[in-house]
Amino acid sequence: MSSHRFAPLASAIAAPLLAATLATAAFSAHAQVDVSNAWVRATVPGQQATGMFATLTAKQDSTLVSASSPVASAVEVHEMKMEGDVMKMRAVPALPLPGGQAVALKPGSYHVMLMGLKKPLPDGGTVPVKLVVEDAQKKQTTIDLKVPVKKAGPAQAAEEHGHEHHQH
Ligand SMILES: [Cu+2]
């Protein structure tokens, strides 16, 4: 299943086209999914896990299939939702990114969970995160991000009415 996950992307590009389209090709590999408002919630010493949030807009129908970061021993795409009056969090194997539609990863909803943190992530730092996105033709693209670490996201404090659920 995962044997082709790390296949070099360059092999998909025909050599004669390479010289003429190098700049465009390099750019479009990153532009396939637009990532905005990315942030990672700052942690305190001893905290094992935190969330990364962002708005993802795919150019064409795509799927977020995995994520990774050197600061965490495991990274999963999670969904959080209310079941009765309990906030539950679960891993989702893949997150659909419909073409042209902004998908918000935000507190209380979808997020990228960084688990097994090797050290605290202080407010004001940055965290490298890789997102792996697959298009409708099953071609995978890796998006390299440097995500700022913050105590809280832009407009989310009000939206959450103070809920802070850290349980899994
Ligand atoms: Cu989570």
Image (cartoon, helix red, strand yellow):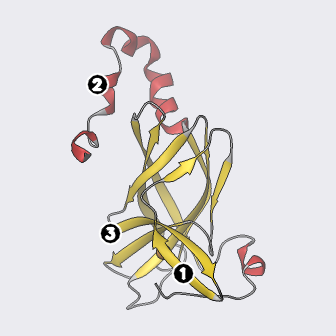
Q: Which residue is mark 2?
A: 11
Among numbered discs 3 and 1, the one appearing first in the sequence: 3
Element type where label 1 sits in the image: strand
Residue 71 x %, y %: 34, 70
Q: Nearer the viewer, residue 157 or 83?
A: 83
Q: What amino acid is at disc 2?
A: Ser
Packing grade of label 1 (10 A; few <14, some 14-19, many >=20) is some
Q: How many marks?
A: 3
Rendered view: 160 above or below 95: below
Residue 133 x %, y %: 45, 45
**Residue ID at (61%, 70%):** 109
Residue 52 x %, y %: 52, 67
Element type where label 2 sits in the image: helix
Disc 3 versus disc 1: nearer the observer: 1
Q: What amino acid is at disc 3?
A: Ala
In the picture as drawn, the residue positioned furthest to the top comes out as 16
**Label 3 – label 2 distance at C-alpha:** 28 Å
**Residue ID at (78%, 80%):** 158
Residue 104 x %, y %: 65, 59
Q: What amino acid is at disc 1?
A: Lys
Residue 74 numbered tag: 3
**Label 1 – label 2 distance at C-alpha:** 41 Å
In the picture as drawn, the residue positioned furthest to the left comes out as 3
Q: Quadrant of the N terminus?
A: top left
